[in-house]
């Protein structure tokens, strides 16, 4: 059974996830590009890896939570990477959101070297990570899913094996399509209400109780009213994800007309220098188009 976990990538999501594993009794050794994030884990009972090799050397499971596909490729396949330094047989669980094709390729390379690999991207945002309430969409074998299940149960409430390697990432792409569209329409509704002089606090309260209610409205509504765009989930990451969505849709021959349009808005925000803001900053696009 799993006792020692290496956790690589202690950002907005990774740090609270690693802390939850440490609090649940696992020995968690962390590694991150900026060392202050490792200090924060150590303060919560974790250990410092110092390097990828140092973090994974005696781990039973390795979790990676880094930004993008090239980061995962370098981290797992690189000369100083996880597959080079971890013990064969180790569970390697990538929880980053990356391209499904890259995820499949990495899993194939890892499997060939004797590792048990899962893609396990998450939804639920920073709040879901902190509160251990993530949805976890898993691609890989049933046997490896069952082995990783105790970790998933610490990190989230809804771990589901959705299919073979890469399919966790495909489901996550669908998640990002829905969330971006949701935020865009919430932003349009908010500007619409404001332009009519309606009290938006009361407006969003009653909308939240009806069919228009959503997790996006519950989590982001108040901050959007106040134009508080501190991340949360950075526009730069959602831009990466909408690229995954549009590429995957094209490859599969699926029309996503609204999603493709929202992808353009997310990309525009990134180009305008707003990549560091929360994705609820789609509100800026609606304000701009409305001359407000
Ligand atoms: P982040 O930028 O806050 O954190 C990423 C961390 O990875 C950083 O601390 C960075 O130093 C570290 N890192 C990058 N490359 C590394 C390497 N080679 N070795 C060690 N550390 C490395 O990002 P985040 O918001 O935590 O997101 C991480 C992943 O989770 C992304 O793929 C994102 O799309 C996904 N995600 C984010 C959210 C969210 O709400 N923030 C929700 C669900 C999924």
Image: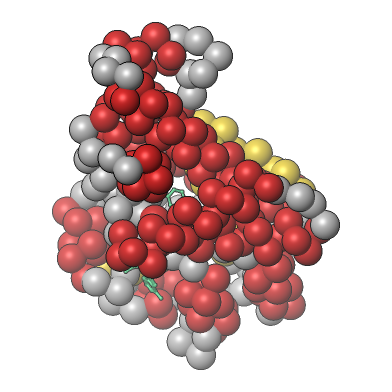
Left or right of 245 in this view: 84 = left
Question: Quarter containing ligand 1?
Answer: bottom left
The residue nearer to you, when weighing 42 against 200, is: 200
How is the model colour-coded?
secondary structure
- Res. 8 image quadrant: bottom left
Total count of labels: 0
Left or right of 194 in this view: 254 = right
Against 100, is 227 above or below?
A: above
Pinpoint residue 267: horizontal percent, then vertical percent: 47, 61
The residue nearer to you, when weighing 25 against 66, is: 66
* Residue furthest front as drawn: 291
The residue nearer to you, when weighing 89 against 41, is: 41
Pinpoint residue 178: horizontal percent, then vertical percent: 58, 39
Q: Residue at x 24, y 56 (%)?
A: 41
Pinpoint residue 154: horizontal percent, then vertical percent: 45, 39
The residue nearer to you, when weighing 234 against 26, is: 234
Q: Residue at x 47, y 53 (%)?
A: 265
Pinpoint residue 232: horizontal percent, then vertical percent: 32, 46
- Res. 289 image quadrant: top left
Residue 144 visible in the picture = no
């Amino acid at each position: 059974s799993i006792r020692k976990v290496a956790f690589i990538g202690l950002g907005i999501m990774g740090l609270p996830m690693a802390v939850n594993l440490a609090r649940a009794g696992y020995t968690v050794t962390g590694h991150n590009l900026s060392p202050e994030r490792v200090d924060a884990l150590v303060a919560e009972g974790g250990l410092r890896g110092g390097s990828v090799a140092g973090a994974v050397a005696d781990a039973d499971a390795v979790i990676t939570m880094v930004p993008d596909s090239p980061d995962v490729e370098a981290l797992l396949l690189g000369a100083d990477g996880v597959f080079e330094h971890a013990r064969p047989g180790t569970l390697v669980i990538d929880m980053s959101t990356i391209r499904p094709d890259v995820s499949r390729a990495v899993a194939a390379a890892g499997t060939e070297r004797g590792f048990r690999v899962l893609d396990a991207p998450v939804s639920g945002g920073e709040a879901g990570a902190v509160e251990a309430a993530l949805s976890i969409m898993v691609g890989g074998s049933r046997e490896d899913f069952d082995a990783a299940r105790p970790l998933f149960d610490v990190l989230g409430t809804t771990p589901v094996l959705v299919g073979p390697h890469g399919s966790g990432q495909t489901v996550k792409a669908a998640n990002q399509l829905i969330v971006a569209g949701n935020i865009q329409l919430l932003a349009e509704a908010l500007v619409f209400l404001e332009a009519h002089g309606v009290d938006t606090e009361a407006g969003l309260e009653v909308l939240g109780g009806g069919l228009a209610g959503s997790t996006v409205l519950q989590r982001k509504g108040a901050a959007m009213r106040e134009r508080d765009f501190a991340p949360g989930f950075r526009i730069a990451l959602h831009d990466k994800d909408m690229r995954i969505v549009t590429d995957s849709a094209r490859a599969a021959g699926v029309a996503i007309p609204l999603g493709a349009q929202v992808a353009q808005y997310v990309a525009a925000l990134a180009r305008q220098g707003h990549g560091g803001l929360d994705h609820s900053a789609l509100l800026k696009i609606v304000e701009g188009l409305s001359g407000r």
